[in-house]
Image: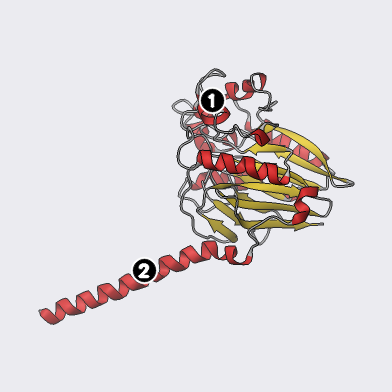
Amino acid sequence: MKKSVRFFLKNIRFFSALLLVGIILCGWSCRQTNDTQNSTFPESIDDNFNFIVANDMGRNGYYDQKPIAEQMGETAGEIGIEFVAAAGDIHHFEGVASVDDPLWNTNYEYIYSHPELMLDWYPVLGNHEYRGNTQAVLDYSDVSRRWCMPARYYDKTFEVGDSSTLKVVFIDTAPLIDKYHKESEESYRDIASQDMQAQLHWIDSVLNASHDTWKVVIGHHPVYAQTPKDEIERENLQERLDPLLRKYGVDMYIAGHIHNFQHIQMPDSPVDYVVNSSASLSRKVSPIEGTQYCSPEPGFSVVSVSDQELSLYMLDKTGHVLHTVTRTK
């Protein structure tokens, strides 16, 4: 009997050790890119066209939201930025009720108060916005000088470098996903009135007409990502959105929603798929097929564009560069 107990305990310790090694290796595989990346920006970034991407923000300043907001301001002052792209879920959990909702102050105005962030913000809707009054998110453009949301989906063209242009297409991903339509009466009331095919036709026409040097698409939901969230979210976007990204040579698709950093390159696609981490509360992550980098750190990203190069820098809450996605011409 004693031998059996000793044998059992010995095997328990052995398998526990194996499990610990597996956990360590998994964590290392998600962070190993850190060791080969520079932790600061290149000196040339000051001469580039730069903007910040932030999402999954609205926690009334709690968790890491306020420190990250301050770091966004410090980074903006360091490199000079043209605007902030807010990639959805500016307001957790039930969106906003109106343009006068106090959450506009506690989630946004009082948090992103750094002087260097007093410039144009270009938002997209996230799933949490759809739990409230999405029209109020658009109408807030009439209240705040820096909130610039002309429509649920829209595009902007910017001159960069000496002779190049950057096309940024801001899209509304929740209506492209079936699960939100199925839950529209209960939780996502504004989804029911959205025309999925009309938006897909618009995206097709905008990308088809673009002859810009660089093309970036920003939406809340990722096309590819490791996450416990419903697989149908990615499947729907892989079926409906991804063919357009590939067809028209989009350089980068930037999303949020998952609350961690992920950089994915699929073997049959020329697109760099980026998941930007939460600017408040982050979650665990592990690699999947195509993962070039992943990290559970909260933070934000900086996109920097020149004639020859498009780079996205993933930053943690202290402004440390974790990983860089770079495309060249």
Tell me where residue 312 appears, x and y as whole percent. Answer: 68, 51
Residue 76 visible within the image: yes
Q: Name the disc covering residue 19, or none.
A: 2
Secondary structure at badge 1 equals helix
User: What count of labels does the image hold?
Assistant: 2
Q: Nearer the viewer, mark 2 or mark 1?
A: 1
Q: Name the disc covering residue 276, or none.
A: none
Residue 250 visible within the image: no
> In the orientation shown, which residue stands out farthest toward the left?
1
Q: Which of the pair 83/215 is nearer the observer? A: 83
Secondary structure at badge 2 equals helix
Q: Name the disc covering residue 105, or none.
A: 1
Q: Residue at x 85, y 47 (%)?
A: 161
Could you tell whether 1 is left or right of 97 in the image? left
Real-space Cα separation, disc 2 to disc 1, in angstroms: 46 Å
Tell me where residue 32 appears, x and y as whole percent. Answer: 55, 66
> In the orientation shown, which residue stands out farthest toward the right?
163
Q: Amino acid at mark 1?
A: Asn
Q: Quadrant of the N terminus?
A: bottom left
| Badge 1 density bin: few <14, some 14–19, many ≥20, Cα 10 Å | few
Q: Amino acid at mark 2?
A: Leu
